[in-house]
Image (spheres, rainbow, N blue to C red):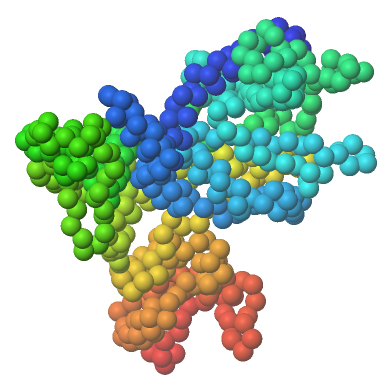
Amino acid sequence: MADAPEDLADIRRDLERGLGLIAKMAPDYVLAREMYDGTRAEQATSRAAETIIRQAKDAPLSFAHIPVDVIADKVELASITGTGAAAKKALETWAEANDLDDESVDWIRKACMFGDYYVVTDPTGLDVDGSFTVEDIDSVGLSPLSTVRVYDKKTGRFPLYGVHVWDAGTKDQPITKAILYYDDASVKVYAEGANVSDADLFELDYSADGEPEDAYLEHDGGKMLLAHLAIGGKPYGVPVHRKAYGPQDAITKISANNLVNVEAQGLPSRWALVDPNAEIDDDIDDDFGTDGPDTLPAKADGRRDATTGRRTRVVPGAVEYLRGVKETGTYEAATSDPFLANMEWYVRAMAVACGVALFEFDLNGEQPSGEARRRAEGRSNRAAARIKRQATGFFREIADTVLGVLGISADVQIAFNPSETSTDKEGLELVALKVKAGVPLRTALLEAGYTDTQVALWYPDDAPALSPDLVTMLATALAALGNAQTLGAIDSAGIAAMIPEVFRYVETVADEGALPGVETRPATAAIVTRREAA
């Protein structure tokens, strides 16, 4: 963490490192995007291959986007809340003003695609007394192609500052602008020209009638306004589909060549075998010229030029006579089976390498169900869980920044929707078996994919979490235990220890007040049996 330097030379030094990192990592980000889109061109080995590649770029075929989409779809933000009424209200207003439900989906997907993504919280709105208003606090996603957060060189874990650069101005007067984000302020700089990469050319950006201090945008909270989501790595992430690059290259080449083959099937190439002894002119009558190789001078009719008009026609059901051609044929186009077989192998390789269930790539549309599907999605769910842990810190940092610039102190909680929910017959049977084996009902439902909010609504904390089947089982067990206590085989303390959740609820009710129509007793009172009463 660092505060904004006051000297322009120090700002240029920081800007130089940031611009250098952006330029260094840009090719990898571009490659990740092209692989996702399927527009990455193959290296040509001939001019014919160059033509094929150019045609393929106009009709891309991408499978590499599937690992990104599958895992990103499993990381869905559920809520951002803060402790205290002020924090809760501020975060709700901010989230609604920024359409966070949709924006968060875009941020997570792009982070999975690039490996890195950034969000800047820009408190540009001011009310009449000069303080920030929640509605005008914008949280905007920024591409890693133009943005970077710089970390300390020793550990690569502590953020020092951030840099965002973009082209501004006009075509005739281009300008390159940049903002450096520090903990206490953001600094605006600019340079004349487009895509300026020399930090020494940048100057502080303020109006002509202003002061250099106007280039500093101070803010409260003591946190950098730029948040960074790194997927699968520190300090900078790795694209989710990084292991799909090799198979995608092969798929692109196979698809391009197969498209050429499909064209050859529709417009096949043909051949014609010429007879060396045949009359090659269209003049087959002595009355129409003397240019034939077998025409004798005695039969000359005064014409010395060959006739040039074609007498052949292509009419359905007609016979076409070709002069001088002995035989014709069509080159047989290659079948698509070898192409499709190779493509299927590389698709399978991509699924295994990226840890995504094969049915997500299945070209036949076959989908498993039940336990088979859950087992197949195991690696994807674990990958999504890791991204959720990383995204939790990312969203918490953004929320802390929002509360910081508003001067609100609160703890922030981040919640994500479950990666999967077991709502089919097999899933619900598994929940029932877990409960029967002794797993608490709340835990079994959470493991099945239901949210904390749903489980808390169904089974509040001040009530026992008992399913209908469990109530029946408890009734039977309590009746048997009552008989055992009557016989003196067990006492009330032993019963309470065996079924603690029910008795905890009873004690809570006794402490808070009796339920209507229910007689309560102190939790320490002993249970008096008929034998003891007698």
Left/right placement of residue 3 relative to residue 507 reads: right
Query: In the figure, 208 relative to 259: above or below?
Result: above
Percent coordinates x, y for residue 81 in the rendering? 65, 52
Picture residue at 51% right of the left edge, 33% below the top? 116
Against 30, is 256 above or below? below
Placement of 345 over or under 2, stated as above or below:
below
Kindly tell me whether residue 226 is visible in this rendering.
yes
Q: Is residue 159 left or right of residue 358?
A: right
From the viewer's perspective, tell me whether residue 419 is left or right of residue 201: left
Q: Residue at x 73, y 51 (%)?
A: 97
Q: Based on the displayed image, in which of its 4 quarters is residue 251 positioned? A: top left
**Residue in the image at 20% along x and 37% along y:** 301
Nearest to the observer: residue 507 or residue 17 = 17
**Residue at point 12% right, 37% down?**
299
Question: For residue 284, what is the image quadrant?
Answer: top left
State the quadrant of the C terminus: bottom left
User: Which quadrant is home to the N terminus?
Assistant: top right
